[in-house]
Image (tube, helix red, strand yellow):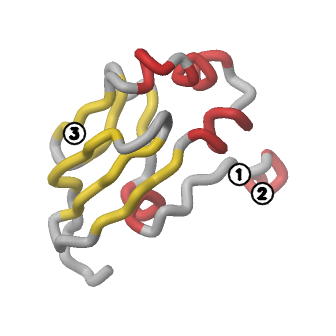
Amino acid sequence: MNDASINIVSATQSGEYCIRLVFSDETMQEVDFKPFLLHAIHPDIRAYLEPGRFAEFRVEYGDLIWDDYQLCFPMIDLYHNTITHRSHMNAVA
């Protein structure tokens, strides 16, 4: 990824919790959100394990979001397909 701004131009559900993302530089990633959702502790995030709710994502202003930004991810993590939970110890450091 270079210094140019990268945005998501399309997002298509490709599996139960998988979304195929196409970025403005034509890079494509198939992101599996299930491990992230399964490891979530907060019930507001775990609520997206309900298939109908998960399927209600959209691309808005180049970002992948659910609801009113209740669930969204850093662009760099989506671009590199590295969405993970960070432990509270890493967040403090």
> Dot 2 corresponds to which residue?
90
For the residue pair 7 and 50, the one nearer the viewer reads as 50
Residue drawn at x 37%, y 63% is 29
Residue drawn at x 52%, y 49% is 32
In the rendered image, which quarter contains the N terminus? bottom left
Q: What amino acid is found at the position of numbered circle 1 in the picture?
A: Arg
Q: What amino acid is found at the position of numbered circle 2 in the picture?
A: Asn
Against 6, residue 63 (above or below) is above
Report, in whole angstroms, how far the alpha carbon at label 3 lies from the one at label 1: 24 Å
Tell me which numbered mark, 3 or 1, is placed earlier along the sequence: 3
Q: What amino acid is found at the position of numbered circle 3 in the picture?
A: Val
> Dot 1 corresponds to which residue?
86
Against 11, residue 27 (above or below) is below
Report, in whole angstroms, how far the alpha carbon at label 2 lies from the one at label 1: 6 Å
In the rendered image, which quarter contains the C terminus? bottom right
Where residue 20 appears, as percent x and y from the top left, is 33, 52
Camera-nearest label, 3 or 1: 3
Local secondary structure at mark 1: loop
Task: Locate residue 5: give its quadrant.
Answer: bottom left
Instruction: Classify residue 23 as left or right of residue 20.
Output: left
> Which residue is farthest front?
15
Camera-nearest label, 2 or 1: 1
Which label was assigned to residue 8? none
Which label was assigned to residue 59? 3
Where residue 78 appears, as percent x and y from the top left, is 42, 57
Local secondary structure at mark 2: helix
Instruction: Classify residue 62 as left or right of residue 54.
Output: left
Label 1 neighbourhood size at 10 Å, few (<14), some (14-19), many (20+)?
Answer: few
